[in-house]
Amino acid sequence: MIASLTAAAQNTPRLAADAFYKFDRSHSQIFNRQNIDSRKQYFSAELYRLFLNEIKREAVYLKKNPGDKPYFGDGLPFQPVREKCEDGPNGRYRSLAIKQEFQKASRAVVTATFAYPSPCRQNEPVVYTIGMIRTGGKWVIDDINYGEDTTLKQRLQRKEY
C-alpha cells in the first residue's frame, strides 16, 4: 500500500518534489548514511552514488582533521538552514512552495521557494531549481541549483575536500 502511494505521488515532477520535501522536512537533517539511505527513493542513481562517495570522503577528512566541521556540517543540502524570523515572541519559519517550470520527455525542472510569511517579507525568498529525471516509472531528483555558481552535483564532484 505504501509503495503504491509513493508511486502515485511521483506521477509528475511537482508531485514527486512535494513528496520528497514532505519527507525531508519531517526527518533528521544530519548528513549521514542513514539519512541519505532514507531518501534514496527520491534520488537518481548518480546522485545517490555521489552522496555515498561524499560520506566516504567525509570520513577520511574527519580522520585527518577531527576537530573540523565537515563540508556538509550544516546538514543535508535540500533546504536553507532553519532560521527563525523574529516578528514576535514565537517567530516564524520559511514556508515552501513547489512549482513545475519545465518538462520535456524524461527531464523536468521544478523550483522550491522557501519564503517567510508577512511581516518577515523583508527577507528575500530562497529559490532552489531542481533538475529531475524520470526513471523506473517515477520522477526523481537528479541535481539542485542553489542560485549560485555551482550545483549540488558539482559540489559533490569537487576535487578537494
Image: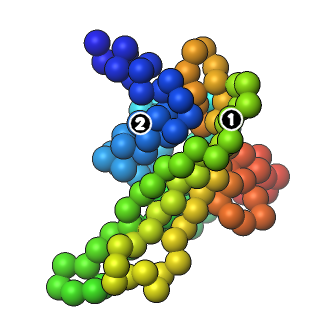
Judged by depth in the image, the label closer to the viewer, 2 or 1, is: 1
Under tag 1, what secondary structure? Answer: strand
Helix, strand or loop for disc 2: helix
Tell me the residue at 51%/60% (across/down): 113
x, y percent for residue 33: 48, 37
**Residue closest to the far left:** 89
Disc 2 target residue: 19
Rendered position, 128 above or below 1: below
Going by the numbered disc 1, the residue's amino acid type is Gln
Q: Quadrant of the C terminus?
A: bottom right
Image quadrant containing the N terminus: top left
Q: Can you say whether 53 is above or below 147 in the image? A: above
**Which image quadrant for residue 107?**
top right
- For label 1, the residue is 103
Alpha-carbon span between mark 2 and mark 1: 18 Å
Quick check: can you spot residue 38?
yes
Tell me if mark 2 has few (under 14), some (14-19) or many (20+) residues whose alpha carbon lies within 10 angstroms of its own.
some
In terms of depth relative to the viewer, which is nearer, 68 or 124?
124
Mark 2: amino acid: Ala
